[in-house]
Amino acid sequence: MEESGGSISTMSQSPVESFGVFTIPESKRTAKATSIIPVFLGSNMALSVMVFGWLSILYGLSWWQSVSAILVGTIVAALFVSSSALLGWTGATNNSVASGAIFGVRGRLIASFVGLLLCIQYVALTIWTGGEIITSGWARLSSGKVTDALLVFGYLAIATATVAFAILGYRYLVKLNNFIVYAMYALAILSIFALSGSFDFNYAGAPDMYALGAFWPTWFLAVLTCGAAGPVSLVTQTGDWTRYVTSATSKMAIVRSSFIAMSVGLAVPTLFGAFVAVAAFDEESFVAGYVAGAPSWLLIPLLLIGFIGSLGQGSVNLYSMGLDMDAILPRLTRLQSTLLVSAIATALVFLGKFVYDAEAAVTNACLFLTALGTAWIAIALSGYIRMGGTFHKEDLQVFNQRRNGGIYWYQGGWNIKATIAWLVGSICGVMGISSVDYTGPIANALGGVDVSVVAPAVVGVLLYWLLDRSPVRA
């Protein structure tokens, strides 16, 4: 099969998935609700997720303070975000296109834009951490040094492998992550055994070096960046997998599976990252500490952790990025879109590697994108509920087919009211950030309390509700 702009034509069978963002036929929707669980458990057991556990320790928190922040943020956010899986499942397309019912068939480009930014962040982190642990591990095995040339090789090796699986698509990604679940969890248990001698459950942190100067603001920062940011980063991705789930499945089963996938899939690797940071801390680099603290017999498993873990995380995010780019540029096939975003993400790694401070860059990017994503999903779910949880699938595809009209056309393809609500909610979220080197005016007025998650959700939904009740046509 081949696709372009939402149309399907028949051709010879190919191992490469041809479905882009058009409606998945009922005959192809054969997956179970639980199919999303191994995908998220496998893909998130990666260094790019583990690094957030290191970040909580870097903030100055103790082991148990980090554990509580990670669990509270992850579980609360997963409870909220898990319903996003209903968008793609109901529309039989990805979440970005499905959101056209609320934002308009062109207004859903907001979701594609947010989704691209969220995925680019994690792809860049994947290539960075995966490439670094491969090169650092190899340098220690060969008694050599980590050179720029070796780093470039490591980055390109990770990027090439992840692109290959992202291109193959849904079916192969499901198989890959079913394998990764067992491989990565086994390697993690091996690492726990290897590092247990230097791990201290009573690790007290560094109270005199709290990232925000005091415990509660710093703990809450960790709740957001090391906990809540994980589920929120998936708001546009869940539909990539539930669109293949049979329409006969109950909504509760979809939400339940999505919650399990997010909460377990993100909490476990983040907690593992905090464990490694306590056992082998390096202020400059999570990977450097991991490699330096590992006994010699663990170095080969570390190379596998870097490569296998990066395959899952990188390919899943590249797959989603390809779908989002396909939604933005319908003339491109999914294959062309995936190759384009892969090149962009890899280029960003090379451009940013030697420029930005890791702690500040990761923290600020997480909080900024969390604000954008929270405002979008809060409004999208609010609209979904008000519409009775149903979509007109054919009218969702108007933009992809380069047509006008349909019940989601609103004003020139945009629901101005929903768009304004998202913009205002997002701005309030950004102004509510309290980070290591930036405090927005709203957070500052609240004594440094970060409201970058609460503000966009509350303001976005409330403004959308008020505007939608107004007599002005949109």
Image (spheres, rainbow, N blue to C red):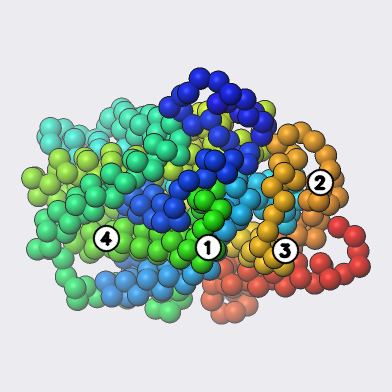
Vertical position of residue 244 compared to residue 379: above or below: above
Q: Which residue is mark 2?
A: 406
Mark 4–mark 2 Cα distance, whole angstroms, equals 49 Å
Q: Quadrant of residue 395?
A: top right
Nearer-N-terminus badge (4/1) = 1
Residue type at mark 4 is Phe
Label 3–label 1 contact, CB within 8 A = no
From mark 3 to mark 1, how far is it between C-alphas? 18 Å
Q: Is residue 264 left or right of residue 101?
A: left
Q: Identify whether 470 is placed above or below 245.
A: below
Quarter occupied by residue 346: top left
Count of numbered tags: 4
Compared across the picture, whether 72 is left or right of 20 comes to left
Crowd band around label 3 with a 10 angstrom C-alpha radius: few (<14), some (14–19), many (20+): few
Q: Earlier in the sequence, mark 3 or mark 2?
A: 3
- Can you see residue 212? no
Write the residue at 25% across / 36% down. 135
* Residue displayed at 23% across by 47% down: 183
Q: CA distance from mark 1 to mark 2?
A: 28 Å
Query: Which residue is under mark 3?
Result: 387
Q: Secondary structure at mark 2?
A: loop
Q: Is residue 399 left or right of residue 51?
A: right
Q: Please report whichever mark, 3 or 1, sits nearer to the chain's N-terminal start.
A: 1
Q: Percent position (x, y) of residue 423? A: 72, 59
> Which residue bears the numbered disc 1?
250
Which image quarter holds the C terminus?
bottom right
